[in-house]
Image (tube, rainbow, N blue to C red):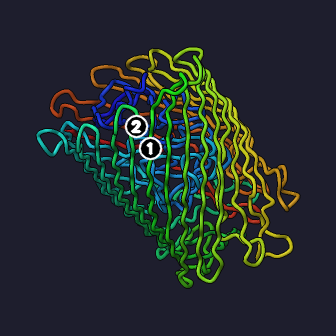
Amino acid sequence: MSLATPRATAQTEAPATAADNTLPVVKIRVAASAGERPPAQVEVTRSGAAVLDTPQTINVISAETAQLQGAQTIGDVVRNSASARPSNYFGTYESVYTRGFWMTTTSNYLRNGYRWVHLSQPAKRNVESYELIKGPAGLDYGRVEPGALMNIVTKRPLETAWREVTLSVSEGDGWDTGFDLSGPLDADRTVLYRLNGGTGRQAFVTNAVKPRQHDLAGALAFKLSTDTRLDLDFEWTDRSQAIYPGLPVPDPRNADSADAVPIDNFYGEAAGRFDGWHKLLTAKLQHRFNAQWSANLGFSDNKTRRDVKQIRLTGTTGNVVNRAANPFAQQWNVQTLQAELKGDLQLAGMRHRITLTLDRSGYDREGSSNNVGTVAATTLRNPQPTGATFSYGPVTTGEVRDIGVALQDYIELLPHWNLLAGVRRSSSREVNPGTPDQTGRSTDPTLGVIFKPQPTISIYASLARSFSPNAGTLLAANVYAPPSRGKQAELGAKADWLGGRLRTSASIYELTKSNVPTPSPLNPLFSEVSGEQRSRGAEFELQGQLTHDWNVSAGYGYTDSVITRDNVAANVGKTAAWTPRHTASLWSTYQLGHGWSLGGGVFHTGAKFVATNNLVAIPAHTLVDVMAAYRFRTGLPGARVQLNLRNLFDTRHYEGGGSSAAGFTNLYPGMPRTLSASLSVPF
């Protein structure tokens, strides 16, 4: 089902012959279909192969789906992806865990294919889709944790004039207003623009937090010739709120005991604040030399900062809730320069799609040390602010530089058989004042074999690797730890059905992260790289249109993630933290006719331990959401009103928490039953 907002979609079908090879974004059209077909291609991979022909699991969650579901945060979005689930971080954003591993905000996110560091909740207004590639992605992007990589694709300028204003309100003190403008700036439509922005307050479990977010984004596209295109983009986001320390747990060994605490209680302080922003500028030049060769050159400048006067709960004794203050500030300045040369050739009777990538990514960071401040205890039943002081430590600085070169070849090897082979050589250097430079190198190959018994079915096997430097980790005086390594073997099958309207995918995998730092039992100032975590699992997903009016997406993930090596013997064999064994989702919408549509979904998250010791676990939960929408045909033609009722049965559930040797210290509850309404008006 389509919303009022049009989408700029590229003509990105894989070409049948070398002569058909064109830049994928030279031609832009507006998509306004009655339903969402699964995308043929994505930006997160560099091979040029279609999703169906890529030998790894790829999930795409469109902004359209997120809007239909009334999604407010990145955690709301990723629950549509099998084996991906969020954990709350003081109400400021969610940490996402996929296939048992953390998607770090400094290594595992991209914005239009460029490394994107963010320190607060990502803005959603300017998003076209969320692309996730599962497993190590070292071949394409170098430094990355092995669970998954997310590329957030932003809205592109349109060739047809478009204007829209939006307004939404919800229970939990939520509201939002925004605008979206696009179109050509000249008669020949060689210069296109897009501008969107707005302001709002995120609905929250307690009205004491009041998360406010403002954002503005713009894009310009210059068609310099039939073979050359320049894209310029900028984004700015600002967020402020009270720090949310969650709810205390009266019985630290029993998560259910927190159910007796009123969900809207606030155990923070008025002075405990979060203030953060990010700014992003990107430029991308694309040129086609001839039918066989093309090149891309791009640059990204990403700045982000947060000041966090953090209040956290440390445990509950009777009616006393103990608290601590941990203020800190961080700023990252990240630049990425990357160049690609692509060839589409016929060699030895086989088609080769060759990609050579050169990139340089680096950042300068500064921040305060995490000094503990003072804050008095409060009461469990009637929490009241007591005053808090925050003491920032001295400012520290550092810089990191990554350089990489990668070569990959996607070969149509034989009838029905394709091969993806590639290798990347990466080097990194970290500089911190007063310590020796930390350097590292890694060679990360990828190999995938694809068998296509029919054009709409692919069966694949792949091996992939990645690396992640253990920044600042010392094994001894002036001896740094080597990088951690990710390694995955995956078997899977994908198929398109109903003329390409519906896609299914299924996979099994084994994913291992080795060289994991663990505290040295001999000297607490140093570490060992004796840790290893292994994840085995299976995923199934379905996405697309069952009929012209009926859309569906569904997924199931099974994840068995365990600690296989650790210098604490008791941890070996334990389940990795924040990793539910079972995840499942189902979402469907149906157009009834006469402007009406209905939708609903079920989202299940299994129990997950909050620490490697497996002492306490957050209980499993299942949520049910429903929605209804109406598009006006008269009065305000094209306008659309939507109602969402999330957590229909008002299920008390928790998305994150903390623990100590005694058990839970706190839990972060998810939203109770929440009604929201939104209105979009094109003009």
Is 374 left, or right, of 514 in this rendering? left
Up-down relation of residue 163 to residue 666 (above or below): above
Visible in this render: residue 513? yes
Up-down relation of residue 400 to residue 500 (above or below): below
Residue at 85 percent across and 61 percent down: it is: 568
> Within 10 angstroms of label 2, few (less than 14), some, or many (20 or more) residues?
some
User: Closer to the camera, 129 or 177?
Assistant: 129
Q: Earlier in the sequence, mark 1 or mark 2?
A: 2
Up-down relation of residue 551 to residue 235 (above or below): above
Residue type, label 1: Leu
Task: Return the x and y of residue 440 as percentages of the image width and height.
Answer: 65, 63
Q: Secondary structure at mark 2?
A: strand
> Within 10 angstroms of label 1, few (less than 14), some, or many (20 or more) residues?
some
Quarter of the image for residue 570 reads: bottom right
Is 267 left, or right, of 317 in this rendering? left
Is 563 left, or right, of 374 in this rendering? right
Query: What is the total number of numbered labels drawn onto the structure image?
Result: 2
Residue with the most extreme right position: 569
Give the labeled residue for mark 1.
Answer: 341
Any mark on residue 293, and which? 2
User: Closer to the camera, 668 or 264?
Assistant: 668
Residue at 40 percent across and 53 percent down: it is: 123
Task: Return the x and y of residue 458 as percentages of the image width and height.
Answer: 58, 22
Task: Return the x and y of residue 682 as percentages of the image width and height.
Answer: 21, 39
Residue with the most extreme left position: 187
The N terminus - image quarter? top left
Visible in this render: residue 662? no
Residue type, label 2: Trp
Up-down relation of residue 223 to residue 275 (above or below): above
Give the CA separation, mark 1 to mark 2: 7 Å
Q: Are marks 1 and 2 in contact (CB under 8 Å)?
A: yes
